[in-house]
Amino acid sequence: MRFLPAGDLAVCVELGEAISVEVNTRVRALEFLVQQKGLTGVVETVPAYSSLLVYYDPRAVGYEPLCAAIAELVPQATTAVLPPPRTVELPCCYDDPGLGFDLAAAAQRLELSTDELVRLHAGAEYLVYFIGFTPGLPYMTGMPERINIPRLDTPRTKTPPGSVGIGGIQCCIYSVESPGGFWILGRTPVPLYDPGAAEPTLLRPGDRVRFRPIDRREYDTIGAAVAARSYQPVIS
Amino acid sequence: MIKILDPGPQTTVQDLGRTGQMRYGIPPSGPVDRSAFLLANRLVGNPDTAAALECTLLGPRFDMTAAGAIAVTGADMPVSVNGRDAAGWTTIALKPGDVVKLGAARSGVRAYIGVAGGIDVPLALGSRATYLRGRVGGLEGRALRKGDELAVFACGPVTMRRVPPHAIPDYTGEPTVRAILGPQDDRFTTAGIRALFDGRYEVLPQSDRMGSRLRGPRIEHARGHDIVSDGIALGSIQVPGDGQPIVLLVDRQSTGGYTKMATICSSDIWRVGQARPGQSIRFQQIDVEEAHRLLRESDTALEAAVREEIA
């Protein structure tokens, strides 16, 4: 464990240096404890793969006392303290080349049929390590090793929101139109970020995500319900 | 009510920003120059939490449908009321129908218009601050346009005040900003760290509320420029593979995977946001305790800056 100053308003609490479920679980547990204990001076927290960024008000707490208070919580930061995770089911249309525009190329690269690739991708459960980069964008792993694929050699400049992509061991869903280097296998009609909604972001750190393959017709039906604000995401 | 006759290139509603949303990828937003923003509010008797306008390089032209008071701070934009020059850094009383115009900034980038009562736009995630990329907050999540009308909260009589000349910041020249090493200073060579603190770095035109891009002596990494993504604090000096620093501001991405050598202290970050493309910046290293002392000094100076009442 290391405490690294991130300016005079934040401290980065580093619990590891690698991407692992174990370290990330401790990060989220530590965040939960910091929030639950209401540590003096803490303003907000941002979990990432292996570290927690804690924003604080130096008018209310000094750097050393804050680090000491957080250090005391670290040994208790285990799975046991976390509330049970939510599982979010995301419908995903893989079978339209206009939506999953890299599916065929990725399957070829992995020497799989497109059906097998979809089955492997949709058959897994994904863990949301954290949300970041753009509003509501989940950083996830959980894919079978068989579909581990290097990222695109040349990142594309624009990826439509809802695009579901893979790269390395990670799975990503674009929340807003952005550049990206992931292979896009399909698209979900469910918005991960909706600035007009009371709660604009769908996913939270620690959520489990499952993809349910849908055809283009259902994609359009759900899309219409989303536009009419009558769609309820399936969360258990 | 404020009616926008000409918005200027990028005028947005901002308050102190939103908290608690970065864990969902939504940045705080709020004013790039917090000190100037606070003074604009305090000069018109508003609480610090009131919403004001942030203008970029060129100010707006607007009329006030009711009597009120405003104050203009930040970048040095010429102010006029009905075509007659008016002073910045001072309370300006307005009659119904007065037309206010802010011209092109002579120095600095962002000016603030505080409006007595504060601007009345809906709260979005607890804040009125506009986050342009996320299309949230302010007026419909966007910059102001011609014809927009902004409601203003009612308020009592306003005491006329001014910021004394010695307390008005100078946005010209080559500012020195103080920075604290970390979180990833161990990913740079000694020469790389020295490059940042010895060199001068020019602000590039591709700078915005997300970050200021700088160009100067190349900063050398010790072992790779990529890290396992982590949270990005205000003022982070991120150095990608090209060795050129990017200073992250209020609309920054909440997390990122580039090494961050140092972080500019909160009482100096406005100097970066007010430096224009072509202006250079120098860096000076301090520690966390020193930065906290500077922040207390800055708080005290801001309190003192609006004590002076005028007739």
Image (cartoon, helix red, strand yellow):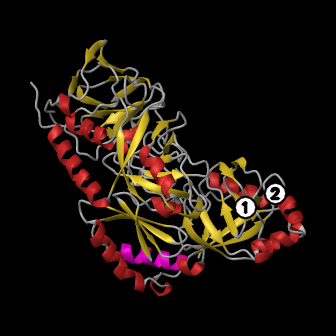
* Magenta segment, prevailing SS (helix, strand or loop): helix
Classify residue B169 as left or right of residue B164: right
Q: Position of residue B262 (x, y in %)?
A: 43, 55
Give a yes or no on whether discs 1 and 2 share a subunit: yes
According to the image, label 1 marks what residue? A165
Residue at figure coordinates x 45%, y 69% from the top left: A52
According to the image, label 2 marks what residue? A102
Q: Position of residue B227 (x, y in %)?
A: 57, 63
Q: Position of residue B193 (x, y in %)?
A: 47, 53
Which residue type does callout 2 highlight?
A: Asp
Dot 2 alpha-carbon crowd within 10 angstroms: few under 14, some 14 to 19, many 20 or more: many
CB contact under 8 Å: marks 1 and 2: yes
Q: Quadrant of the C terminus of chain B?
A: top left
| Vertical order, B122 against A215 (above or below) | above
Residue at figure coordinates x 47%, y 85% from the top left: A78
Image mark 1: chain: A
Residue at figure coordinates x 68%, y 76% from the top left: A125
Which of the two residues, A162 or B96, is positioned nearer the viewer here? A162
Specify whether residue B255 is in view: no
The kind of secondary structure element at disc 1 is: strand
Instruction: Give the magenta range.
Output: A24-36
Q: Earlier in the sequence, mark 1 or mark 2?
A: 2
Image mark 2: chain: A
Q: Is residue A232 magenta?
A: no
Which of the two residues, B133 or B214, is positioned nearer the viewer here? B214
Residue at the limit of the structure toward the top, as seen here: B83
Residue at the limit of the structure toward the front, as seen here: B191
Which of the two residues, A190 or A135, is positioned nearer the viewer here? A135
